[in-house]
Amino acid sequence: MNDSHIPPPLPDGSTDSPPPLPPMPPRPAASDPDRALFQVTEQTRTYPCENCGAQLVFDPTTQNLLCLSCGRSHAIVLDPARRVVEHDLASTMTQLRGLLAAAPPATTSDSEREIVCQSCGGRTTFTGTLTATRCPYCATPIQRDDIHAAPTRLPVDGILPFQVDDTHGREVIEKWINSRWFAPTEFKKYREVGAFTSLYAAYFTYDADTTTSYTGMRGDNYTVTTGSGDNRRTETRTRWSHRSGVVGNNFDDVAVLANTGFDTERVHELEPWPTGQATPFSPEFIAGHLCRTYDLDADQCFPVAQGRINAGIDAAIRRDIGGDHQRINNKDTRYNSLTFKHVLLPIWLLTVIYAGTPFQVFINGVTGEVQGQRPWSKVKIAFAVLAALIVIIAIVAAWAAWA
C-alpha cells in the first residue's frame, strides 16, 4: 500500500475541476429568530435572555439554552431537513489549497484579535484558533463568527453536544484524582490550583471504502515427538504455505484530533466517540463553553487516520489468511471512496500546574471517560516502599520464630 501522507487518488481518474468548498451551514431556525445578538462590527454574537437580559448558556442536562439568572430554558430548534454531510477529501482540499494560495495573509486565523464586549465594554483577546470564550470582566459568553465563516476555512459540519454537565464532570474528576494514591497532596488540591473548563475541540472524521489485494504466508502449527527414553519430548512446529487474496473494508468515522497543545495520546484514549449522534452544527450549542477551530486541516490530519485504516486492513488480511500465524508480504490498497467531515467534540479539561509543569486531565463530554496525567509523589512512594519492607521483615521474623 502507498503509505505516503497524500491521500491516494480515487479510481475514476477524473480531471474535472473540483467542486467548490461546502458553504457555511445556514443559521438554524429557532423559536425566537432574534435570540442571538449579532455584533456586526465585531463579528461576534452573544445570547441574551429575552426574559431578564442575562446571558444564556448551553445546558447539557436539558440540551437547551439556559439562563443561569432567571432559570428560563430556551429550546434549540434545528431545521429537520439539515443533515451532517461528508465531503470528498481530495477534491475539497484541492479547492481549499487554491483559495489559500490566493488569499491575503490577513484572512488566516493565527493572529490575535481584540474584541470589545458588547455587555460591559471590556476587551477580550481571541488568540489563534479560539472561537468562543467568556469575557474576563462580566463572564458574557462571546463567539467569533469570522473564523468559521471565512472562505479559507473548512466549515463545521456537525457537533456532538455536551451531555456531561459541570456537576457530573467535577464528580468524575474528584473520583479519578482520589484514586491516584501516589499523587502529591498539592496536586489533589486541584480546586485551588487548577483550571477546570468545558471546551469543544475540533476533529476530522474519515470514512473510507477500500479494496486490498495481498500476498502472504499462512502458518499452521503441528506437533512432533522426538527423542526416546528420558529425552522423549513433544515439540510444536509451524508449517508455512503461500496465500494471496483480496479483502474489502469499510471504515466509518475514524476520528482525529485537529488541535495542538493537548496530550494527544490521552485525548485519543477518550474514544470511542458516539459520532453517530452528532447533529448539524448550530452556534447555540457552543454558548457558554470554550471552542476552538482546527489547527491542522483535513489533509494534515489524514496520516493519523491512514495509520488506523492500515491497521484495520492488516487485521482483515490476517483473518483472511487464517491459521495460527500470518505473514503479510505485500499489499496494494485501492481507495474506492474517501470522505471526511469537520465536527466539534466536547471535552472537560482540568489543567493543574505542579512544580512548574502543566498536567492535563480530560473527560469525554458525552461518555464520562477520564484520561489524564498526574505527577508522582516521591515522599509517598518512599513511605510505601518503607512500609512494604517493614511488613516483609515482620513476616520473616515471625516465620523464623515459629520455625
Image: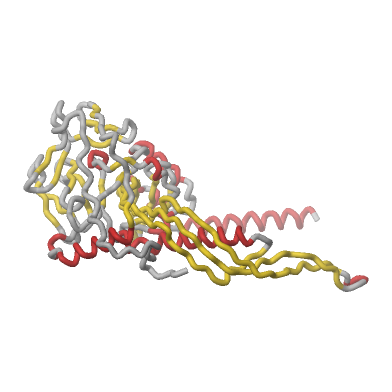
Q: Which sits in the foreground, 198 or 268?
A: 268
x, y (%) of residue 175? Answer: 45, 42
222 vs 247, left or right, is: right
x, y (%) of residue 199? Answer: 29, 47
Q: Residue at x 77, y 65 (%)?
A: 222
Q: Quadrant of residue 68?
A: top left
x, y (%) of residue 70? Answer: 20, 26
Is 7 above or below relative to 46?
A: below
Is residue 213 in view from this perspective? yes
x, y (%) of residue 151? Answer: 18, 55
173 vs 280, left or right, is: right
Q: Which sits in the foreground, 149 or 322?
A: 322
Q: Residue at x 16, y 32 (%)?
A: 33
Q: Residue at x 43, y 69 (%)?
A: 3
Is 272 above or below relative to 306?
A: above
Q: Quadrant of residue 377?
A: bottom left
Is 328 above or below relative to 187?
A: below
Q: Residue at x 14, y 50 (%)?
A: 124
Is 67 above or below relative to 174?
A: above
